[in-house]
Image: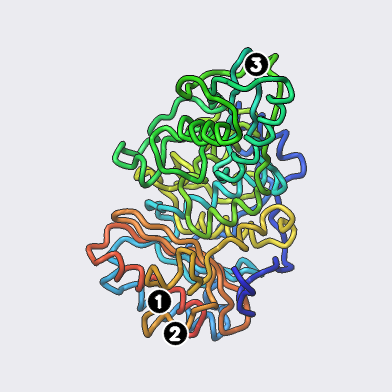
Amino acid sequence: MSNPPSSVRTTARHRKARTVHPAFRRVAVVAVTAPIAGTILFGTTAFAADKTAAKTTARKLDPAEQKIAANLDTRVQDTRLGSTLSGVVIDAASDKAVWGHDATTALMPASNTKLGTATAALTVLGPGHRFTTKAVYGNGTLTLVGGGDRTLTSADLEAMAKTAVAGLKAAGLTSVKVQVDDSLFPEPTLATGWNDGYYPDSVAPVRALVVDGHQVTDTSLDAGQVFAGFLAQQGVTVTGDVTRGSAAKGDVPVARHQSGRLSAIVEHMLKVSDNDIAETLLRMTAIGADRRPTFEDGTAVVREVLRGYGVSLVNYEIHDGSGLSRANRIPARSIADILDVADDARNAKTLRYIIDGLPVAGEAGSTLGPEWGRFDTADSQCAVGKVQAKTGTLTGAIALSGLTKAADGRWKIFSFIENNSTADPAATKDALDGLAATVNGCWA
């Protein structure tokens, strides 16, 4: 994104902190391996108060917040939103509840699930983490070893091929067999709530090796074939077909590539809502927590990380990292909690990339861009450049969660999750954009 509008959040605010315990990485592994209730509850949730207390808080709202609450009470009745909506608005600095509508009701969150995935990946691996792809040689075979880098490009493989060929020729070798080793991840399976119709367009089978984000059934062999082509261009003969195998311990490293920083990968993943990156990060996060790189272990680590930050996990159920699972259920209050943690100044070193990665209303190239018809109605276009939010879209589920500076000059965190509306999805998205503009106050 180019220089953001002045109203867009680019730095974390100063406020009371809900931070993860410094010893989280060590504790999380133990806790996930042998879960014990409250093992890593180091913070408190922004929604600890019951409905009665929330009503008491509502009487203390400032005039701008009172208007937000009153307008939302009316506007959530919009028929485009159907009858099943979980929503919440909180004041970012004080955690004061401004408005809620079935905030604890768990609904299908679609890609809002990625916010938890991003939080866990940044916490366990660290924002500076890089993923490594290697090429090793032994017994006449050059093996391309996948390291979970979903951002690997053809240019990266070409550079690796040039380095490898230089070493091979220096050793007097002019022909090799080529194989791929993607054993870092187990054989791909469907997550609970997935169907094979998702492959390969919505998401590719999750493997540890891929090039150019290709949406193909076997991304590893595809990457190996691209690599083999570059070897041939450099004058090395590749004998036979590219196969799958395992690198031997004695194989000699001949080339490697490191990805960009995890922080940048997370930002991109959120901007465009990349399902494949999300699922790869879920597995790499599990590995970082000494767990198996599976849906089950990856989501268990996500839950433990969120619990460590004090995020409410009441009715929180996830089965993947991307939000494609139709079995996922998350309340709006938990999504708002995650954003609250990410926007906490004391978590900025680790989690500010989540806020930076949120699409901005009207930002071309993001999921809130004009090419997707977002924030382009009379009610919502006033919020262009003023709202940052993660989108979520599945058949029967549309979500929008983020933050904006309201009319009182204070930042508000919001989450709206809608399920089962019979309206056209584009109309439902327009209605949700209107709710965000209501929080901002520009649609008064």
Question: Within the image, what quadrant is residue 78 found in?
Answer: bottom left
Q: What element carries label 3?
A: strand
- State the residue at coordinates (58%, 49%): 118
* Residue 306 image label: none
- Between 291 and 53, the one lying in front of the other is 291
Q: Mark 1 points at which residue?
A: 434
Residue 413 x/y as whole percent: 55, 67
Nearer-N-terminus badge (2/1): 1
Nearer-N-terminus badge (2/3): 3
Q: What residue type is labelled 3?
A: Gly
Left-right relation of 367 to 53: left
Question: Within the image, what quadrant is residue 410 found in?
Answer: bottom right
- Between 211 and 405, the one lying in front of the other is 211
Q: Mark 2 points at which residue?
A: 443
Q: Name the residue under label 3.
A: 138
Structure colour scheme: rainbow
Contact (Cβ within 8 Å) of mark 2 with mark 1: yes
Residue 97 x/y as whole percent: 54, 68
Q: Is 345 rendered above or below residue 438? A: above
Q: Which amino acid does label 2 sit on?
A: Trp
Q: How far apart are marks 2 and 1 (CA)?
A: 7 Å
- State the residue at coordinates (36%, 62%): 85
- For marks 1 and 3, give the one nearer the viewer: 3
Left-right relation of 250 to 143: right
Q: Is 69 rendered above or below residue 241? A: below
Quadrant containing the N terminus is bottom right
User: Mark 1: few, some, or many residues within 10 Å (few <14, many ≥20)?
Assistant: many
- For marks 2 and 3, give the one nearer the viewer: 3
Q: Is mark 1 on a helix, strand or loop?
A: helix
